[in-house]
Image (cartoon, helix red, strand yellow):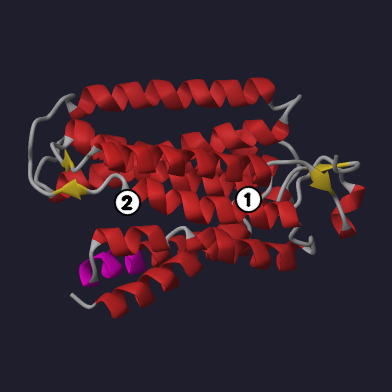
Amino acid sequence: MNPALAVALALTSAACYALSAVLQHHEASRQPESGVATLMIALMRRKGWWAAQTATILGALLHLAALGAGPLVLVQPIGVTALALALPVGARVGRTPVTRRAWIGALCVVVGLPAVLTALPHRPGVGHIAIPFASLACAIAVLVAAATLLALRVRRTNQHWSAILLAGAAAVCFGTTSASVKALWLGMGSVTVVLVAVIAAPLGVVLAQHAYQDGGLGAPLAVQTLADPVTAVAIGALALGEQLAASPLRIALGAVGIAVTVAGVILLSTRVPAVGPEAEAPRRPGPLATPAHAEG
């Protein structure tokens, strides 16, 4: 174990994830409102979008290396710095200033999310499997479908909440993919597990692009940063037999962390005025929130 190396790798991984999020938002927000296939075809023709995917893969590899160099409880909370790094980079790319409200929201997420993650440490080893992986995957599919349909329903009247729902659905897909990979690593793989991973990963990418297109950068990234690891931990505990080291104190800490994180997401999704070149296109959100004529 090398804690210093683990911290360095984790911070570099977070920087890669931050860059990926900024580039994905930048490319998606420049596309006209369209269907899923049209948006993805347009994005796949953009070098910036492919650069974002490359940054994501590099970030994932660095995160795995960090986990090999240090404990999970040290590495995982560092991932939330991606949000703090993404805000100034996104502001520079999108020529939109970072508002005080956005910084306060980011601070809430950066403080609250580690509390959630450290409240859910787990012990390795296979314990009781409460739900078969296939059954849990079906339940997750229903949850993702319901969130997506609700997001589409409210998209015309409330774009930033639509984006939060889409970001949450994307994060659940990413967390499910991580859990599927963990199942294969534990020797619990099957055709179903492989299919789940193959379907969930690209579906998460598609949902994330629409979230960034509709909701700016801050709120979708914060939601994904929270829901992704929580989903993976939940699947590990329910379907892979991983044992949670829960206690009343940890549960209370996690509850407070969730409340603070949710407050941060709400602050990040609050409407702010559009400025700069994007002010002429009020429908397209800036990097930090959904634009409006004025902030209340």
18 sits left or right of 113 in the view: right
Q: Is residue 62 magenta?
A: yes
Label 2 element class: helix
The amino acid type of the residue labelled 2 equals Thr
What residue is shown with label 1? 105
Q: Closer to the camera, 235 or 156?
A: 235
In the rendered view of the protein, which quadrant contains the N terminus? bottom left
> Magenta residues, as a range?
61-69
What secondary structure is the stretch in magenta mostly built from? helix
On residue 279, the disc is: none
On residue 118, the disc is: 2
Pointer 1 or 2: first along the chain: 1
Label 1 element class: helix
- Residue at 41% across, 53% down: 114
Residue 223's place in the image compared with 68, above or below, is above
* Crowd around label 2: few <14 · some 14–19 · many ≥20 (10 Å): some
The amino acid type of the residue labelled 1 equals Gly
Q: Position of residue 115 (x, y in %)?
A: 40, 50
In the rendered view of the protein, which quadrant contains the C terminus? top right
Tally the marks. Answer: 2
Q: Position of residue 128 (x, y in %)?
A: 9, 31
- Residue at 61% across, 26% down: 151
Give the residue furthest to the front.
Answer: 249
Q: Position of residue 248 (x, y in %)?
A: 27, 36
- Residue at 47% across, 49% down: 112
Q: Inspect this view and state whether residue 20 appears.
A: no
271 sits left or right of 231 in the view: right
227 sits left or right of 124 in the view: right
